[in-house]
Amino acid sequence: MAFHFISTMEKPMQHVSLFDWQSRLDRLRNVANARRADAFADRNLSRVLRNESRIEGEWANYASNHALDLRIFEIKTWHELITKSFDRMVKEVDLLVKERAAAETDLEWQAGPVAVIRELLFIRDDRNESELSADSVSTELHNQFFILENNHQLLARLIQTAWEKLARLDVVRFKVEQELKNKMETVEIDTAQRSLTCKSNAISFKLDALRDPKESRSYENWLESTKNLKQMVDNEVEETVGIRESLYVCRNKALSILKGQDQYTEFYIRNRIFQTQQAYNELNWQRSKLVEDIRALTCEIQDMEDALLENTNALKLAETRLENRNQRNITELCLDEAYDSLCLEAEKLREIRRCLMRKLDESKANLNLISDHTNKVDLDIGKKKHSIMIDTKALEVCKAFRVKDAGIPEHNPFAQTDLNIELTHAEDITEKN
């Protein structure tokens, strides 16, 4: 029987081994290290994300500010360009109003001696068909006739056009003023947005801020519309300048033509007579040269025919010799040097015959052309003579109905023409007095 002097008490649970206890400690340590590593990585990623988001936000804000600056500069530039065109248009409107008033004053101006121009045109229409050229005389007479007879109608149309243009410019002015006002408002709005910062008190979240505004359009459409507006203003200015200059030219040119009608008409008719006489003399000279060429070409054709006859006889001789030599005995029928020489001679004579015949045909065709052209020249000489007679008659009519202007000092406007007439001995053609 055993006796225990010391009693022990143990917890009534299964005790773990030292190995299990150490393993649990190791697991806890490993999990703690993993959680600490995850926390470190999370903190690092958070810091990187904060830095990147801050940098990207600042760059995005910088890009937006830069875009706003460029947009404000662009709108201001277009505003300046349109303003310059608009100022030019306003200036042209004032000038057009003054010019229209002056044209209305000159609207009562009456045409000059239209009957004289009608008669001159009727006389000159009696020329032959080939002589009805659009020369300076016809051009001047038609211009004078149109201006002297229809100047008041032309002025009335131009005044009506100027009135319509002024009405159109009022509409354009309203559009441009509205456009300039809109652009200034846009500049003010964009400038105000450019001045906002993250610390401004006027910023807040907005409902659906990324939506497209109603009735908005693309930048390309806006740019094209702005360019079209400026181009429209420039076009209106150019048309206004054209109308104003047309009014000025119409008034002054008509008055100038009325004052110098008799001098201009007489000068151009006499100049046309002189030109026709020069053409008449030139055709006579050409006819004489053509007749000489016809004689020379006829003689040359006869010489060519004689040469062709000689060539024909020589060719006959060479071919006869070749044919007769073929009658030699077969033992003597060889291609000797004489045969080669005769063949060469026949070929040369045939080539010469072809050349002579071709040249003879060309000469005969040329002779026919020269003869036909001589007939045409003869016909045109008669037409030129008839034209000189017609223009001389027109010159007499022009001098008979010459308009006198007491306000113009008497002088000789044809001093150089008189000198040319004297030097060319054409007094009988373009007699002035």
Image (cartoon, rainbow, N blue to C red):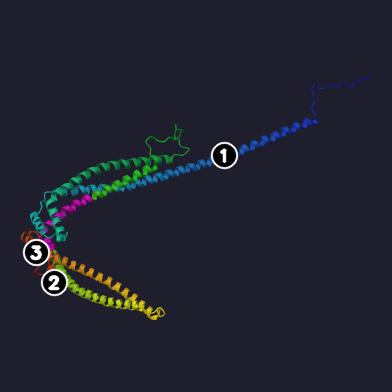
What span is in magenta? Answer: 242-271
Q: Quadrant of the N terminus?
A: top right
Q: Tell me which label, 1 or 3, sits earlier in the chain.
A: 1
Q: What residue appears at the point 82 percent right and 22 percent down from the top-left corner?
A: 10
Residue 80 higher or lower than 202, as above or below = below
Mark 2 is on which residue type? Thr
Residue at label 2?
424
Residue 334 higher or lower than 7, as above or below = below
Q: In this view, does 269 lie to the left or right of 329?
A: left
Tag 1 secondary structure: helix
Q: Quadrant of the C terminus?
A: bottom left
| Picture quadrant where residue 330 is located | bottom left
Packing grade of label 3 (10 A; few <14, some 14-19, many >=20) is some
Q: Tell me which label, 1 or 2, sits earlier in the chain.
A: 1
Residue at label 3?
389
Compute the Cα span from label 1 to label 3: 106 Å
Residue at label 1?
49
Q: Is residue 47 visible?
A: yes
Residue 125 higher or lower than 63, as above or below = below
Q: Residue furthest left?
A: 400
